[in-house]
Image: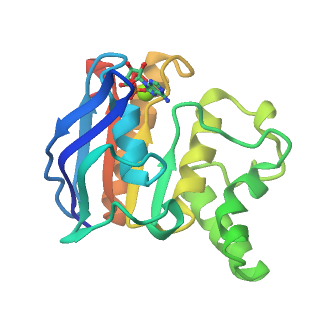
Amino acid sequence: MEITPEKLCKYFGKVKAVDELDLDIGDREFVALLGPSGCGKTTTLLMIAGIYRPTSGYIKFDDRVVNHLLPKERNIGMVFQSYALYPHMTVFDNIAYPLKLKRTPRKEMRERVQRVADMMGIGDLLDRRPAQLSGGQQQRVAVARALVKEPAILLFDEPLSNLDAKLRLRMRGEIKRVQEDLGITSVYVTHDQAQL
Ligand SMILES: Nc1ncnc2c1ncn2[C@@H]1O[C@H](COP(=O)(O)OP(=O)(O)OP(=O)(O)O)[C@@H](O)[C@H]1O
Ligand SMILES: [Mg+2]
């Protein structure tokens, strides 16, 4: 899936969070957006995901303008800056959540959750709750939850301080490997040049 923001703008009152952004992100590409805190990275991802409505401009997936599509109509997996795991749910239920929303049959759900959890190296942690995991394991859960829907696009908002530098590098490597294996167009934002 190609992603093409054209003259994309998001203003919050006088704050121009994103101002006339043009990008060509190719099918199966892994694109990193690098910029300092507050430059509009999260806002850009949230517009691609359909959570924020652009003030003006367009977002195209392949040749189709998707501005009017709801998040659930966009087939996107997103890993948020905060992970946004549900603390009261087990790892299994966290990963299964997008499939539950789609009313996926129980057996298929179990198989798909196990498959992505194994892919991310957390297949033996499914009964735990997020608080019982390390930061790196929590990030793997968040990635597994984004993957389980088999999305056409993956969006990563890099966690700022949750991971130490070494673990961040390792996670970036793992994410890149999975992305290459699955061939899902991905946008990865970071404010940290060492990440690239
Ligand atoms: N809901 C909002 N209401 C008002 N201003 C906002 C809102 N969201 C973001 N902004 C402002 O828009 C600008 C871009 O914010 P954004 O969150 O996209 O930055 P970022 O590049 O993701 O930064 P960081 O690296 O710190 O996560 C900032 O100046 C921010 O204060
Ligand atoms: Mg951000």
Side (left or right) of 144 relative to 181: right
Taking the spot 57% from the left edge, 64% from the top edge, the residue there is 148
**Position of 149 relative to 105 (above/below):** above
The image quadrant that residue 112 belongs to is bottom right
Tag count: 0
Taking the spot 58% from the left edge, 43% from the top edge, the residue there is 140
Taking the spot 75% from the left edge, 48% from the top edge, the residue there is 125
In what quadrant of the picture does the C terminus appear?
A: top left
> Looking at the picture, how far across and down is residue 190, in whole percent?
34, 27
Residue 174: in sight, yes or no?
A: no
> Looking at the picture, how far across and down is residue 83, in whole percent?
60, 37
Residue nearer the viewer, 99 or 4: 4
> Looking at the picture, how far across and down is residue 165, in whole percent?
44, 17
> Looking at the picture, how far across and down is residue 192, in whole percent?
32, 19
Q: Where is ligand 2, by quadrant?
A: top left
Residue nearer the viewer, 120 or 7: 7
**Position of 131 relative to 73 (above/below):** above
Residue projecting furthest to the front: 13
Side (left or right) of 65 relative to 132: left
Residue nearer the viewer, 181 or 144: 144
Taking the spot 31% from the left edge, 46% from the top edge, the residue there is 187
